[in-house]
Image (cartoon, rainbow, N blue to C red):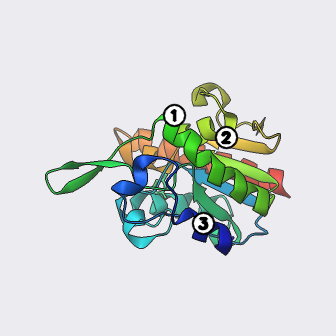
Amino acid sequence: MAGLAGEAADCRRCDLYRAATQVVFGDGPVDAPLVLVGEQPGDQEDKAGHPFVGPAGRILDQALAEAGLDRSRLYVTNAVKHFKHEMRGKRRMHQRPNQGEIEACRWWLSREIALVQPAVIVALGATATRSLMGRVVVLVREGGRPLTWADGRPGVATYHPSAVLRARDEKARTRTFAVLVAALSQAREMAV
Ligand code: URA
């Protein structure tokens, strides 16, 4: 995986490299049974060079622990490898990647998946789901259930951990977190 990550460091497949600090490639063992795919690195990930190390990563870690999964045994990556943002004053505000950026970066995601050969792939949120399915999927209808990705591999689609952070109140937060934990538990069962 180190060779692929090294190649990605010079990626110019879309323009997102221009404003990002660095490429944030996936982390984890190459023989992981489970691959988790997020959207794109956030502000902290962009600086650290590792996926899911900021606030969304802390929610993900809690959900993984509740689902009985050990993050060090999983391969964690993103659909898009550079931080897309706009400046508001001095703050770098997250912007959702567009279809062209998702498609350009699928080249890397497909290669990561081909190397890891996971039993199950979990999409965290709409961007990852779209990248893996090659089309928009309605998460409310298909989320949390076993499904088959466009490449034929089994998987689960669920909320992005940041949906827990954005929930409007405590009740919604608890419910969204429970859905995320249930999907990760489902993926764990599928991977054994
Ligand atoms: N959100 C993501 O989708 N990925 C990260 O790595 C961090 C936040």
Q: Residues within 10 Å of mark 1 (few under 14, many from 20)?
A: some
**Percent x, y of residue 9:** 52, 66
Q: Which residue is mark 2?
A: 132
Residue 23 against residue 138 in the figure, above or below? below
Name the residue rendered at 59%, 58% in the picture: 77
Image quadrant where one finds the C terminus? bottom right
In terms of sequence position, does the residue under pointer 3 or pointer 2 come before the other?
A: 3
Which dot marks residue 7?
3
Earlier in the chain: of badge 1 and badge 3, it is 3
Quadrant of the frame with the N terminus: bottom right
Does mark 2 have its CB less than 8 Å from ligand 1?
no
User: Above or below — where is 100 with respect to 170?
Assistant: above
Give the x, y percent position of residue 181: 61, 51
* Image coordinates for residue 155, horizontal then vertical, percent: 75, 44
Kindly report the distance in space between the C-alpha atoms of the residues bearing marks 1 and 3.
22 Å
The image quarter containing residue 150 is: top right
Mark 3 surroundings: few (<14), some (14-19) or many (≥20) residues within 10 A? few
Answer above or below: position of 22 versus 123: below
> Could you tell me the amino acid type at mark 1?
Gln
**Residue indicated by mark 1:** 99
Q: Is residue 143 left or right of residue 159?
A: right
